[in-house]
Amino acid sequence: MNKHSLNSTLSLTAIFLFALFFILPSSTAAQPPPAVMNAAETEQALKKLTVLGSALFVAAHPDDENTSMLAYLSGERLVRAAYLSVTRGDGGQNLIGTEQGALLGVVRTQELLAARRIDGAEQFFTRAIDFGFSKSPEEALRIWGHDAVLADVVWVVRRFRPDVIITRFPSTGEGGHGHHTASAILAAEAFAAAGDASRFPEQLKYVRPWQPKRLLWNSFFRRGAGGGGGGGDQPSTSGLLSVDLGAYNSLLGKSYTEIAANSRSMHKSQGFGSAERRGTAINPLQHLAGDATARDIFDGVDLSWRRVPGGEAVGTILGEAHRAYRPANPQATLPLLVRAHAAMVKLPADDPWVAGKRRELLEVIRACAGLWVEAVSTEATTTPGGEVRVTTTLVNRSDYPFRIESIMPPFGTSPQTVNADLKNNQPLSTPLTVRVPASAVVSQPYWLRSAPGKGTYAVTDQQLIGTPENAPDLQATINVLTPEGERLVFTAPVMYRWTDRVRGELYRPFTVISPIAVNLEEKTYVFPDRQPKQVRVVVRSNASDVAGTLRLRAPAGWRVSPESMPLALKSRDEEMSAAFTVTPPPDSSIGPLAIEFDNMNGGGVSGSPARGVMRIDYDHIPLQTLLPLAESKLLRLDLQKKGERIGYVMGPGDEIPDALRQVGYTVTLLSDQDLDNANLSAFDAIITGVRAYNTRARLRQQQTRLLDYVAAGGTLIVQYNTSDESLPGNLGPYPFRLSRDRVTVEEAPVTILTPDHPLLNTPNKITAADFDGWVQERGLYFPNGFDERYQTPLATNDPGEAPLRGGLLVARHGKGTYIYTGYAWFRQLPAGVSGAYRLFVNMISAGK
Ligand SMILES: [Zn+2]
C-alpha cells in the first residue's frame, strides 16, 4: 500500500472504450494444468481438512493485501483465508502493457488469482469500480454508491462466513487513498450488518445472516510495513494481539514471508516484484469490534468439525487419515479418505463448510491416488449452436480399484455411461461430442456484460456478485465409483492444450465466442476537418457459413456510405474487410459508432450489436478472451495544426501516437538506436510517452542530445514521469522538482493565468470550454518547484486545495521550446476529448 499511488488513476468514461485489437490465436498464456499435489502439499492439505476456521482480509485494491498474512492464515493456521478487494484495480497504471480501465481490471483480477494460487487464499470482489485516486472516503463511497457496495461486502461475509475480519487500513484516514479508508469503513459496517437479518434481507433467499467473532486491524507502525510483512525494526506490540508472519513451514520449505514475496510478485502490471524476506516478522492486530482478546486471532472459535452438526465423526476419520498418511505409500490412506467422504456426504450440502471441505477432500483423494483428471477439447473455441469434441482422460496411479461410472457432459447433454475400471497407470479416455446451445452466453467477464454505472459494474445476478471470475465456459463432470460403492464426483473445466516448441505443454480455457468477430481499428475516429474518412471494419468468421448484413450506426448529422454491406464467409477463420465512408457534420460533434450484424443463418435478432474478440495474453496469467461490443466513437472537432512529423519515445505504453495520427500527424516511434543516431532535426516535435524516462534507460543517456535538439529549434514535450533515480539531472533546460501533486477531480476548474500566451492561442484559441468533458483526472505528478524561467500558463486544483501551476511548464531554450506536462493527455486523447486535442496540438506547434 505504500507504493499504492501507482495504482490510482482511470477514467470513468474510458472504462468501456475497449481497444478492439485483432489478436490471432498465437497465444502462449500460462494456464495451470490440472496438477496433482505432491507429498508435502498433500500432507499439508490433509492437516487442513481437520481445521474449520476462516478469516477474511479486506482492503481496496489489488496489491493492498498483506500476502504474508494470507499465507500465514492459510498455511500455518490452516483456515480458509480470503482477500476481499473492494475494487479490481481498474484505475491504476499499467507497467506491462496498454490495457487501461476495465481491461486493466481484468488483468489485475487474474494477477490476484495467480497470487492466491501461491499463498493459498481465495479471492473476492465487490462491484465497485476503481475510478482513480480519491482524496476522501466520502467521495469514494458517494461515487460507488455506499449502499450498493456495503451490500456486496455483507454478501461476501454472509457467503464466506469468516470467523474473523481483518482490515488492512484504519477507518481514520492514515491509509491515505480515500478508497483505503472507505474499505475499512465498509468492513466495520458489514461486521455490524451481516448478522442482522433486517439488513439486506433480499440476500437471505440465498444465504443466512452471519456474525463474525471479531474485527481486527492489521495495523502498520512504520513506513514499509505493508504487503510483504515484517522484517527490519519490530514494532512494540506489548498488550496487543500479534502474529509472527515470518514463521517457517518445514513441509513447504518456506516461511510465510517467502511465500508472500512470490505471491506479491504476481502483481506484475504494477511492477511489484518483491524480495523474499526471512526471519521473524511480528504483525500487530488491533481490536476494532466483537470479542476482544490478546491471546489469539481465533480465540474462542471452535476450529474443529464439531462446529458442523453431525460433523464430529468426519473430523475423527480425517484426523486418523492425517496421522496414517505416509508419503511413500499415499494410497494406503485412500480407504480412510473414502470413509470420510461417505460421512461428509451425509451432512447438509448447503452448509458452506461441508461444500468447501468436500472440494478439498476430492483434491486430497486425487493426490493420494495420483489421479489425473482432464477434459481437453480439439478446438480452442466454438460458437453458440456449434459442436466441440472433448476427450476426458483419467489416469489412476495407484492400485486402488476406482471405476469410472459415467461422464456428464455440460449443457444437460445426456450422460455417457462408461463403467470401466481405472487400472494402475492405464489412461482411460472417453471422447464426447458436445453441442453448445444456441442460447449459450459468450465468453465475456460477467461484470463487463452490461454497460457499467459511474461507480459500480452492473451485475444483476446476485449469485455472481463477489465471485472473482466467470465459471468455465465448459465443464465435464465425471462420476467415479470406489469399491465401497461411494460415488466421487470430479469436475474438470474443458481446456485446450497445445505444445509450444520453446515453452512445452500449455493450456488455455476453452471459450464460447460469437459467430463473427467484428473489429474496428480505432477506439475513437477523430475528424479534424470536414473531410470524410474511411472506417475499415475487419470481420473474421468463428464458424462456417456465416452470412448476413453489416451496418454502421452513426450519430445524427453524420453520414455513412454505404448504409449496409452484405457479408458471406464460407469457412471458419475466413476474414474480410469492409470499408465505409464516414462524413462528419460541419460543426463539432461527438457520439458513438456502433456496428450491427443481422445473422441470416444464426437466427440472430435483426439489428443485434456485433462483438469483437480480444485476448489478453501474459505469461503470468491464463489467457483471457473478451468479446466486447464492436463500438467506437466519432469525434468532429475544430482543429488547426502546424508541423507534420513527430518523433515519439514510447514508455511502458500509451495511445497518444495513434491519437496524433488520427489528426494527420506522421508519428515515428523512436527506438534506442534512433535516440543515439537518428537525425532528430527532421522532427517538428519530439514527445516522450508517459513514464518514458522511468522505463527507457537510453533517454537518460541521450538527454543532452534531446536538449541540443531543442536549442537548435526543436520542440520537446515531456509527459509525466515519477520521481526516481532513472531521471536525468537535466530533465529540463532549467531545474524543476517532481512531486506527487495531483488533481483527481476531472471537472476541477482550470484557470488560464496568461490568456495571451502563444500556447493558448496558436494555432487554436484555448478557452474554458476546452477543459470540459475531461475524464478521470486533470493530471498527476505535477512539478511543485521550478525555475522562474518556466512559464506556467495554467493552474488547477482539487476542491479546497491550493492552485497548482506545475501541470504545464514551458520554456524557451535556444531557438526551441521545452514543455513538461503532467496533465493526463494519455487519458484524454484516446477518450476523444476535443479540448485536449486542441491544446496538445498547440504544444506540438509551439516552435512553429
Ligand atoms: Zn490500494
Image (cartoon, rainbow, N blue to C red):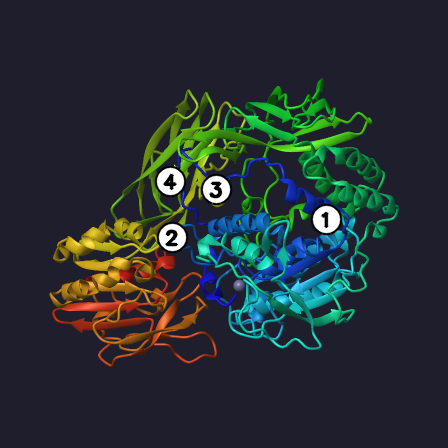
Q: Which residue is mark 1?
A: 48
Real-space CA distance between mark 4 and mark 2, rounded to the nearest whole angstrom: 17 Å
Residue at 43% across / 58% down in the picture? 93
Q: Say whether marks 1 and 2 touch (CB < 8 Å).
A: no
The answer to whether 9 appears left or right of 226 in the picture is: left
- Label number found at residue 520: 4
Regarding mark 1 in the picture, which secondary structure is present there? helix
What is the three-letter code of the residue carrying label 1?
Lys
Q: Earlier in the sequence, mark 2 or mark 3?
A: 2
Real-space CA distance between mark 1 and mark 2, rounded to the nearest whole angstrom: 58 Å
Real-space CA distance between mark 3 and mark 4, rounded to the nearest whole angstrom: 11 Å
Q: Earlier in the sequence, mark 1 or mark 3?
A: 1
Residue 521 percent location from the top left of the image = 35, 41
Crowd class of label 3 (few under 14; some 14 to 19; many from 20; radius 10 Å):
many
Q: Say whether marks 4 and 2 touch (CB < 8 Å).
A: no
Closer to the camera, 495 or 143? 495
Residue 190 percent location from the top left of the image = 71, 63
Crowd class of label 4 (few under 14; some 14 to 19; many from 20; radius 10 Å):
many
What is the three-letter code of the residue carrying label 4?
Leu
Q: Say whether marks 2 and 3 touch (CB < 8 Å).
A: no
What is the three-letter code of the residue carrying label 2?
Ile
Quarter placement of the C terminus: bottom left
- Label number found at residue 628: 3
Q: Say whether marks 3 and 4 touch (CB < 8 Å).
A: no
Real-space CA distance between mark 4 and mark 1, rounded to the nearest whole angstrom: 51 Å
- Label number found at residue 590: 2
Closer to the camera, 339 or 633? 339
The answer to whether 591 appears left or right of 812 in the picture is: right
- Camera sees residue 665: no
Crowd class of label 1 (few under 14; some 14 to 19; many from 20; radius 10 Å):
many
Residue 510 percent location from the top left of the image = 54, 32
Crowd class of label 2 (few under 14; some 14 to 19; many from 20; radius 10 Å):
many
